[in-house]
Image (tube, rainbow, N blue to C red):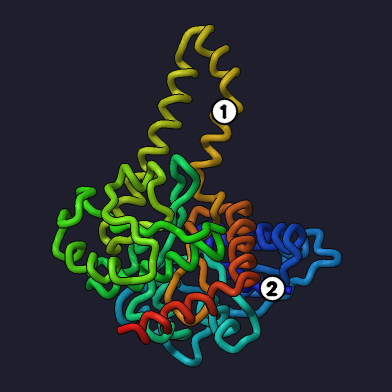
């Protein structure tokens, strides 16, 4: 049985959605759940749930990391061996072999820094990458990095490609994933110096390298893994989320303010619009994996509701079941031996 740690103090509305989602996941997916955080706040919420027959326990962590924790202050809290915050305590459970994966909807930067200091990196990985799943015209695409590394070297992008390819294959079920480098043109030779210098590394590798891809091709489903630096990836993510919200909001507005026929038409297409909303909803994926650290860590949106937490646990459990961490270690080790 997979043992999943849930940071009960992670979401903006903690601990209610965090606990409720964890209970739902324990019931639906059969995972053992370890809730980490302030026990005095977690226990009343947990006691209000039907947990009969479920394996759920609380590990007390009286402190928490917030958006106010930055710079040196964050580093101290992330690396201290006596840290009592929920992220440090939860990640230590994974490090010590008492749990298999860690899920949080807390401060993204804090989650990344804490995981890096407490778990370390996979041998051969210089920097970890945050890798959310983008909906595309043909399915989904793993995009990395989307914010952990604003400035990258060609070797970093190549490592992202290996990690993303393994994750797409093992967790997303894509056979021989197509890997593309995000650029401002399809043709080889286009792009900035980072893309140009990374290209030979991809071409000489065993990856199923597709070549350069523009943003429209990522959304169009041309590749299964899109590799870029954290600055570009973050812009892609936030722009995509904003456009998706704009479109759905405008459709609702037009239907609401339209004629009787428009409103009737709106009722007829409501199921289709619901399906589209579900496709674009980040809560459906739950959380993005932090690939490259020596452990399974998943970081979700601060606005996560119980459904998002439940789905994050689902993804984490699947990653445990398919042994994706071992596969990433083996792939990186193989790349080191071919240098």
Q: Position of residue 261 (x, y in %)?
A: 53, 7
What residue sits right under mark 2 in the picture? 2
- Give above or below for 302 relative to 83: above
Instruction: Say left or right for 221 vs 320.
Output: left
For image coordinates 44% across by 23% down, the residue present is 253
Task: Tell which residue pokes out farthest to the right in this image.
Answer: 53
Q: Which mark is residue 260?
A: none
Q: Position of residue 126 (x, y in %)?
A: 33, 80
Task: Tell which residue pokes out farthest to the top in this image.
Answer: 260
Instruction: Say left or right for 211 vs 187.
Output: right
For image coordinates 47% across by 81% down, the residue present is 329
**Can you see residue 222?**
yes
Q: CA distance from mark 1 to mark 2?
A: 35 Å
Quadrant in which the C terminus is drawn: bottom left
What residue sits right under mark 1 in the picture? 272
Please report whichever mark, 1 or 2, sits nearer to the chain's N-terminal start: 2
> Observer-nearest residue: 223 or 122?
223
Element at label 1: helix
């Amino acid at each position: 049985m997979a043992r999943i740690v849930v940071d009960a103090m992670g979401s903006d509305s903690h601990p209610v959605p965090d606990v409720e989602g964890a209970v739902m996941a324990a019931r639906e997916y059969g995972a053992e759940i370890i809730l980490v955080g302030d026990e005095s706040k977690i226990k009343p919420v947990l006691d209000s749930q039907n947990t009969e027959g479920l394996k759920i326990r609380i590990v007390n962590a009286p402190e928490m990391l917030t958006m106010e924790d930055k710079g040196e202050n964050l580093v101290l809290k992330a690396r201290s061996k006596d840290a009592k915050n929920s992220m440090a305590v939860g990640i230590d459970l994974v490090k010590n072999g008492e749990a298999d994966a860690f899920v949080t909807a807390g401060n993204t930067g804090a989650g990344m820094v804490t995981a890096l200091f407490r778990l370390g990196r996979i041998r051969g990985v210089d920097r970890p990458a945050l890798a959310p799943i983008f909906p595309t015209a043909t399915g989904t695409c793993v995009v990395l990095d989307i914010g952990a590394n604003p400035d990258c070297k060609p070797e970093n992008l190549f490592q992202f490609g290996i990690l993303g390819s393994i994750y797409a294959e093992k967790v997303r079920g894509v056979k021989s994933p197509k890997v593309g480098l995000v650029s401002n043109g399809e043709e080889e030779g286009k792009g900035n110096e980072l893309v140009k210098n990374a290209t030979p590394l991809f071409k000489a590798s065993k990856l199923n390298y597709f070549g350069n891809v523009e943003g429209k091709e990522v959304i169009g489903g041309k590749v299964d893994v899109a590799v870029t630096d954290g600055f570009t990836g973050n812009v892609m993510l936030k722009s995509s989320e904003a456009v998706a919200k704009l479109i759905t909001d405008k459709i609702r507005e037009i239907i609401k303010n339209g004629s009787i026929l428009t409103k009737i038409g709106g009722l007829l297409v409501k199921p289709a619009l619901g399906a589209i909303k579900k496709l674009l909803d980040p809560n459906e994926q739950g959380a993005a994996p932090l690939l490259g650290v020596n452990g399974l860590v998943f970081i979700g949106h601060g606005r996560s509701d119980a459904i998002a937490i439940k789905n994050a646990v689902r993804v984490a459990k699947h990653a445990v079941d398919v042994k994706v961490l071992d596969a990433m270690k083996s792939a990186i080790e193989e790349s080191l031996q071919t240098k």
